[in-house]
């Protein structure tokens, strides 16, 4: 795969367009990420899907938004529309930590440069395109626009914002994964319809007057509180989110309407989940799996992480409160066929730098492949946001045998020495007693094979917290289940003579989490002999249950009041408990435990360390260390279009 013939990639410049013999383009996409032609990068996926329908598409990665806008002019005017793809990650999460400090690098830019994308590319790119080409349709896609399709809280501006269409001047949002909607839109525009006439495509969002709402306000439409009413009352915003989340996870969802600034935001229901054959057809598109040659000898961190990985399913039924996957991909899992997966593995083995190791066989969650409802009719009526919280649905078939078959087939592929699981494991699925001996046996077999054959020294799992109260708000299983899984992990390692570690992920300052909860987390993780490293401070991101709790102060499901650590001082005080084992924090931890009346935890934390109190440390030094750069929030799966 060392042939760097430019026509293997989609064109990014006028010269590359001419190399293909094209004199016009149907679609021009402006991407906030570097152009990596890989099925885990949303811009590449959507562009390849457009290409597969016989259309001429080009990508302009990370255009310069300063000066004379030459990058926005160089390919001219497309026949159908401009597509704006701001990036695989939310631009603000990608750029800043929870403390609003600049991250050390942009993982989706060459050499980690920070100056290659603006804040809110959806808005910046669209405004420039509207100024230059006022009559060409502009379509927003990707995680940034998808999560801002209705009134949402923006942590970075500390403000409740309208649908992003207002600020961007774009014509339409395609939310979620977007392949089907993009194909249908291209088809209708090719037929000569204007963008203002196209109002019926599923999974799209547009603005119109009340009189222009197709069919008027129907009885089964979900009419949300207006944006202005949400500004007046946080309860209204919490109530809105309850409906938004519910409709995002229904097979037969309703149309959502919201009034804002004298117009109506119309959110058409999503398409049904893709079929296996449909997902296979996308995965089988002719991706080079490589960055564009323009990045030769440059490092793109996000690509380095997934270059030899294979994504085997889409969707996640976990419903974690802080995660955007269900609002973007949906809760229903679509799994690729074994044949399609093996075809991609074979392609990976042909890469010049492949050394025999598949870095990850996974998805939004590592072990949901092939799982679905036993009775699909029951799924069609279900309104639950999670299939596994508070309890695993009795209709869910928890069967790991298909996944085991995939692992074994991959390991038999020539040139594959070993395949690893880098995605997060749902241990609640592994430990679930289904009352079916065959299914339980497959879970036990999976656990052993996972630990013995597919762990690269460290297995990632995400208990997130130790407090039952906080875990309930997160929609995560009780910590006792993690402790049970760790015992099994340690036992298998001992029996097999392995020296492997569990790497647990934890979150501080989640809504409902108190200083006392963090102190108890420190004690429990110390008991388990963990010195935590994979940690993050809760970052409010648009359209998640956790963010709505943090902003409104209410749990949208119950309307119960939920307290949160909101100031940087409160958040720093919680976060330092992750580092109880560092002597420079002992004085501050002691002070906080005394303040909240939990001196009993002092001995549990600091026994065997010595009784000498360390001298007080300067606040500025303490704050600098506590606020040191966090890693971006974990992606719950790839391919974020």
Image: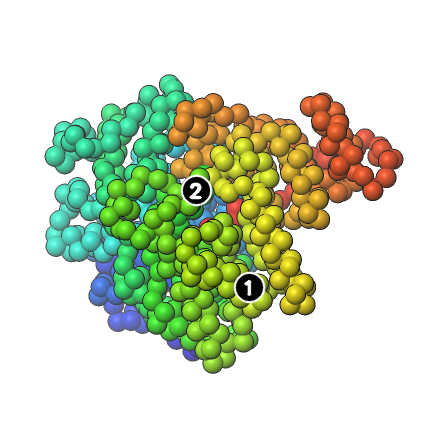
Q: On the rendered structure, is 47 left or right of 525?
A: left
Residue drawn at 86 percent across, 35 percent down: 611
Q: Which residue is mark 1?
A: 448
Q: On the rendered structure, is 359 left or right of 177?
A: right
Ranked by sequence position, the earlier of labels 1 and 2 is 2
Residue drawn at 26 percent across, 71 percent down: 21
Q: CA distance from mark 1 to mark 2?
A: 24 Å
Say above or below: 214 vs 43: above
Where disc 1 sits, the SS reads helix
Say above or below: 49 vs 224: below
Residue 511 percent location from the top left of the image: 52, 31
Residue 269 percent location from the top left of the image: 24, 42
Say above or below: 9 vs 64: below
Residue 391 — which label? 2
Report crowding for label 2: few under 14, some 14 to 19, many 20 or more residues within 10 A (C-alpha): few
Residue drawn at 59 percent across, 50 percent down: 484
Q: Which residue is situated farthest in the top direction here?
A: 232
Closer to us: 253 or 429? 429
Q: On the rendered structure, is 387 left or right of 190?
A: right
Q: On the rendered structure, is 71 left or right of 281?
A: right
Residue 508 percent location from the top left of the image: 59, 37
Can the viewer see residue 126 in this picture? no
């Amino acid at each position: 795969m060392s042939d760097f013939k430019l026509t293997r990639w989609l064109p990014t410049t006028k010269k590359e367009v001419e190399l293909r013999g094209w004199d016009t383009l149907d679609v021009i996409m402006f991407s906030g990420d570097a152009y990596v032609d890989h099925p885990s990068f949303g811009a590449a996926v959507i562009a390849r899907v457009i290409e597969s329908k016989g259309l001429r598409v080009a990508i302009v990665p990370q255009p310069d938004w300063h000066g004379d806008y030459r990058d926005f002019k160089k390919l001219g005017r497309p026949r159908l529309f401009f597509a704006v793809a701001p990036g695989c990650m939310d631009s603000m999460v990608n750029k800043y930590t929870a403390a609003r400090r600049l991250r050390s690098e942009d993982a989706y830019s060459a050499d980690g440069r920070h100056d290659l994308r603006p804040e809110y590319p959806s808005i910046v790119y669209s405004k420039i395109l509207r100024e230059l080409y006022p009559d060409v349709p502009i379509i927003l896609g990707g995680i940034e626009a998808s999560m801002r399709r209705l009134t949402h809280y923006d942590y970075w501006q500390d403000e409740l914002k309208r649908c992003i269409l207002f600020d961007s001047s774009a014509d339409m949002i395609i939310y979620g994964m977007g392949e089907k909607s993009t194909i249908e839109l291209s088809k209708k525009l090719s037929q000569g319809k204007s963008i203002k006439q196209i109002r019926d495509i599923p999974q799209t969002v547009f603005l119109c007057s009340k009189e222009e709402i197709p069919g008027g306000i129907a009885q089964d439409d979900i009419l949300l509180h207006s944006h202005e009413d949400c500004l007046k009352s946080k309860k209204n915003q919490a109530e809105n989110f309850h409906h938004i989340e519910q409709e995002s996870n229904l097979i037969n969802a309703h149309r959502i309407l919201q009034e804002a600034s004298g117009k109506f935001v119309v959110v058409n229901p999503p398409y049904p989940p893709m079929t296996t054959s449909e997902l296979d057809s996308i995965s089988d598109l002719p991706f080079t799996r490589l960055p564009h040659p323009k990045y030769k000898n440059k490092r793109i961190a996000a690509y380095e992480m997934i270059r030899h990985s294979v994504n085997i399913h889409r969707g996640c039924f976990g419903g974690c409160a802080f995660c955007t996957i269900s609002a973007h991909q949906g809760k229903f899992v679509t799994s690729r066929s074994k044949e399609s997966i093996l075809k991609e593995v074979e392609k990976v083995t042909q890469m010049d730098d492949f050394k025999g190791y598949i870095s990850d066989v996974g998805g939004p969650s590592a072990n949901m492949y092939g799982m679905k409802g036993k009775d699909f009719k029951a799924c069609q009526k279900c309104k639950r946001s999670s299939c596994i919280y508070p309890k695993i649905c009795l209709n869910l078939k928890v069967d790991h045998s298909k996944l085991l078959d995939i692992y074994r087939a991959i390991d038999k592929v020539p040139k594959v020495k070993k395949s690893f699981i880098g995605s997060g494991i749902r241990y609640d699925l592994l430990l679930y007693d289904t009352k079916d001996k065959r299914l339980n046996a497959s879970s036990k077999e999976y656990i052993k094979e996972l630990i013995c054959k597919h762990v690269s020294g460290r297995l990632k799992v995400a208990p997130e917290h130790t407090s039952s109260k906080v875990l309930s708000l997160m929609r995560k299983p009780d910590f006792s289940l993690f402790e049970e899984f760790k015992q099994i992990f340690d036992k298998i390692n001992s029996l097999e003579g392995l020296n492997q570690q569990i790497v647990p992920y934890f979150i501080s300052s989640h809504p409902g989490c108190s200083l006392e909860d963090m102190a108890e987390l420190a004690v429990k993780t110390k008991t388990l002999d963990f010195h935590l490293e994979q940690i993050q401070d809760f970052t409010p991101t648009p359209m998640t249950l956790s963010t709505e709790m943090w902003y409104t102060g209410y749990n949208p499901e119950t309307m119960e009041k939920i307290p949160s650590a909101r100031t940087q001082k409160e958040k720093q005080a919680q976060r330092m408990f992750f580092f109880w084992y560092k002597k420079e924090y002992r004085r501050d931890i002691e002070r906080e435990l005394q303040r909240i009346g939990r001196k009993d935890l002092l001995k549990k934390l600091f026994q065997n360390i010595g009784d000498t109190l360390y001298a007080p440390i300067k606040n500025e030094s303490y704050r600098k260390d506590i606020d040191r750069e966090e890693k971006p929030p974990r992606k719950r799966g790839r391919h974020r279009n």
